[in-house]
Image (cartoon, rainbow, N blue to C red):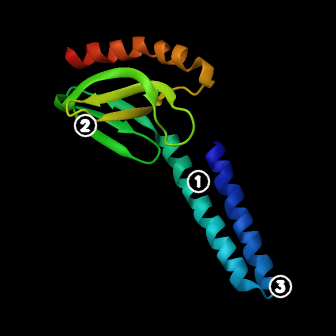
Amino acid sequence: MIWGLVATFGLTLACVVAVSGIRNDKWIGGAVVAGILGSLALYAAAYARGAARAAFMAASHEVIIRNPLRTMTIPTAEVSRFSAGKQRTGIGNPTPGILVERRDGRCYPIWTLAREGYVWNSQKNTEAWSGVAEDLNRLLHD
């Protein structure tokens, strides 16, 4: 919801800047700023759409992870296990949640099976996911 609001605000602001630039005969500067704001707003809109569609599915033949910006389909034969861990987001503190570990060593976060929290509760929140990881591993190996 927040990303949708950011996108709406960004697009509105881009339109206001563009119209203001045209009215004041500074249309080049207005167009540049509007283009930058519009691009950021479109990225926020794409992320908002992806966040709304995020999902996880484990079937007998494949595991599908649909995160906000990327969808991965992994055959179950290539999945080593599910683990509780800290998901690296690239920005800020890692988020405690569930990771899919492949046989070749690569790890993928499951965005829908994660929970933000305070950094000082990170270990406790990671341990809270261990039961879910065990259940998923039982399903994987049955």
Tags 2 and 1 touching, CB below 8 Å: no
According to the picture, the residue beneath numbered tag 1 turns out to be 44
Circle 3 packing at 10 Å, graded few (<14), some (14-19), many (20+), is few
As shown in the figure, which amino acid type bears the numbered disc 3? Asn
As shown in the figure, which amino acid type bears the numbered disc 2? Ile
**Which mark identifies residue 74?**
2
In the image, taking residue 118 as reference, residue 75 lies left or right, namely left
Closer to the N terminus: mark 2 or mark 1?
A: 1
In the image, taking residue 2 as reference, residue 102 lies left or right, namely left
- Expressed as whole percent of the image width and height from the top left, the position of residue 66 reads 39, 40
Image point 83% across, 85% down: which residue?
A: 24
Image point 38% across, 32% down: which residue?
A: 56
Tags 3 and 1 touching, CB below 8 Å: no
Q: Nearer the viewer, residue 120 or 38?
A: 120
According to the picture, the residue beneath numbered tag 3 turns out to be 24
Closer to the N terminus: mark 2 or mark 3?
A: 3
Q: Nearer the viewer, residue 64 or 90?
A: 90
Using the rendered image of the protein, determine whether residue 74 is visible from the camera's viewpoint. yes
Quadrant of the snapshot with the C terminus = top left
- Expressed as whole percent of the image width and height from the top left, the position of residue 132 reads 40, 15
- Expressed as whole percent of the image width and height from the top left, the position of residue 112 reads 47, 31
